[in-house]
Amino acid sequence: MTTPTAEITRDGTLIITDAQGVSVTTEHATIGSARLEAINHFAGIAPIEGLIIHSIDPEYEPADLHIFPDRQVRPLEPIVIPNRPRSTPTVVLRPGETAAAFSGTKATPTSAPAQLGKRGFWNRATGGVFRFAPGAAEAALRESTLEIQRGLSDHKTTTFLNFKGGSGKTTNAWGVSSTLGRIRGGTVLAWDNHENRGTLADRGAQASHTLTARELLLAAQELDPTSLSNELSHYIRPQGNNRFDILASASLGSKKILVDDIGFNLLHNALRRFYRMLLVDTGAASNAKNWFESVKASDVLVLSTLATEDSAKAAFATLDTLHQLGFADKAKNAVVIINQTAQPNADRIARMLSLFAGVAREVVLIPFDPHLAEGEVIRWEEIATETKDAYVHATAAITRGMGL
């Protein structure tokens, strides 16, 4: 009797040879599917103590594997990937550099084995025997995550703009705030700075109170910073596992601007003492003093637009206005977030991507998501994975423009 063998060729052919020397050949679309078939075959005939087989794989050196009935796979010796050194090369260090050198040898999150997709499945299915590197999409997601988590030296403010209502400003403010809260953590506030009544609080988790920015402004005018810190929790609306807070705009529409330029600056100066990140959702009036002041106070501007003709025109008009008002540098550093519609127009999206890329720093496309389109309270768990990933890239694009 001989050791059973699983031999896989580069074209996905699997040759299984049992202990009696009898071979069976099957064809597979990929090397990965051939591996899974081999594991399933030997796990199905393995005794409770497991079965030793010899593996011949085009992506690894030949090795002996211990396969168990529950499909666990353990190598008897470390698996070696061809054309890679089997030992760590000697590094010559100078005195005083050893600690930094040791820290530098640790794998970064971007170089760790894949966790998502088919590559992540194979890494888990083989119990770590195979350590496939992440694919391009997962690697990009890790890079964006690291960008979101990088250290910043000071408070940062981001403002979401578009002169047209219903252009995705509020949805994107919620999406970016949630992404920051879940990935970066810390203190994040989404502030509804509409001239009259905004809907940011309607999209978030509901609070036990109805206090808004107007009431907080009145309190801030009367309280010193220490007292305001103690009172702040009465005005904001925590968003649970999304780990950010919402400050709502006035709950009733009014012809009177409730927070003017002086009021905005008073609130902004107070809130930046308690929040590392402020994300400001604005209205549609560029002549509103609080709109102007929010742009002036921002480190990064975000142009939000639906992938529709009227919303795109309004976004370009907003950019033009920023230049006219003396905010050309902020406009050039802006991020454009395009929210796709249920029936996307490929030609229009291509036009938007091309033209916005010429006038803004980065452009990010958010796929259509039925849950976000409902206008109801947004629940992170109901957002599609593709949408969450897109918001990770959008949030990274924003933090890239924040400097240090």
Image (spheres, rainbow, N blue to C red):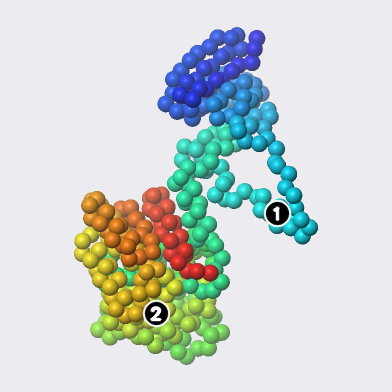
The residue that mark 2 highlights is: 296
In this picture, residue 204 sits left or right of residue 23: left
From the top left corner, tell me how far across and down residue 97 is, in percent: 74, 58
Residue 167 seen anywhere in this rendered image of the structure: yes
- At numbered mark 1, what does the secondary structure look like: helix, strand or loop? helix
Residue 316 falls in image quadrant: bottom left
Compared with 3, 397 (above or below) is below
Residue that numbered label 1 is attached to: 101
**Disc 1 residue type?**
Ala
Say above or below: 122 vs 325: above
Foreground of the two, 108 or 375: 108
**Residue, far bottom:** 222
N-terminal label among 1 and 2: 1
Q: Amino acid at mark 2?
A: Lys
Residue drawn at x 27%, y 54% is 350
Location of residue 80 in the rendering, given as x and y in whole percent from the top left corner: 63, 32
Circle 2 SS class: helix
**What's the residue at 49%, 48% (across, down)?**
139
Instruction: Identify which residue is drawn at 67% across, 50% down.
Output: 105
Quick one: 195 or 397, which is closer to the camera? Answer: 397
* Vertical arrangement, residue 315 with respect to residue 112, above or below: below
Q: Position of residue 82 (x, y in %)?
A: 60, 31
